[in-house]
Amino acid sequence: MNTIKEIQEEIVDEFSMFDDWMQRYEYMIELGKSLPLIEEQYKTDDYKIKGCQSQVWVHADFQEGKVVFTADSDAIITKGIIALLVRSFSHQKSEDIIAADTKFIDEIGLKEHLSPTRANGLVSMIKQLKMYAIAYQAKANN
């Protein structure tokens, strides 16, 4: 399994193949379609990310010492954004998720192409994924 950094470098490479943001948005929509989908039973307020303009649900599971994420959103671009985060953080150890940076988001130029509310939502998504990792790490240490 690749490290978070390696996965993020792959994402940066993929985005560098596109000339303009329309192509990048289309690619993000495609990525959203490959998102490991959250089960319907978790599409509740408990799993909804606060601070997102659109609805985004994230569920985390702990399998063989790694955090595994599933997610969904009712907005296609947002679904692409959460897909990028799930791809880079899922199937990784808690401590690696907690320690990981998200500079790759700046490197692909995503932040500057998001509305302020979407950019806030992105920060909330990252925070939520890290919170799950912190919770699993705390459980593992008890």
Image (spheres, helix red, strand yellow):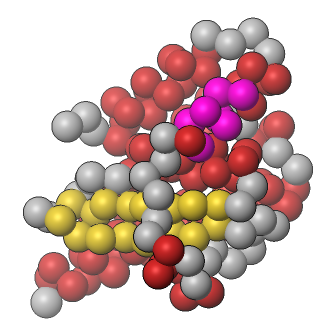
Q: Is residue 30 magenta?
A: yes
In the picture, which quadrant includes the N terminus? Answer: top left
Q: Quadrant of residue 125?
A: bottom right
Q: Quadrant of residue 23?
A: top right
Using residue 91 as the reference point, say whether residue 123 is left or right of it: right
Viewer-proximal residue, 14 or 5?
14
Task: Give the residues drawn in magenta, as a range.
Answer: 26-32
The answer to whether residue 93 of the structure is visible from this angle is yes
Using residue 94 as the reference point, say whether residue 116 is left or right of it: right
Residue shown at 57% from the left, 61% from the top = 72
Residue shown at 31% from the left, 60% from the top = 68
Q: Residue furthest front?
A: 40
Total tally of numbered discs in the picture:
0
Using residue 21 as the reference point, say whether residue 55 is left or right of it: left
Give the dominant element type of the magenta stretch: helix, strand or loop: helix
Residue 80: x and y, percent? 63, 44
In the picture, which quadrant includes the C terminus? Answer: bottom left
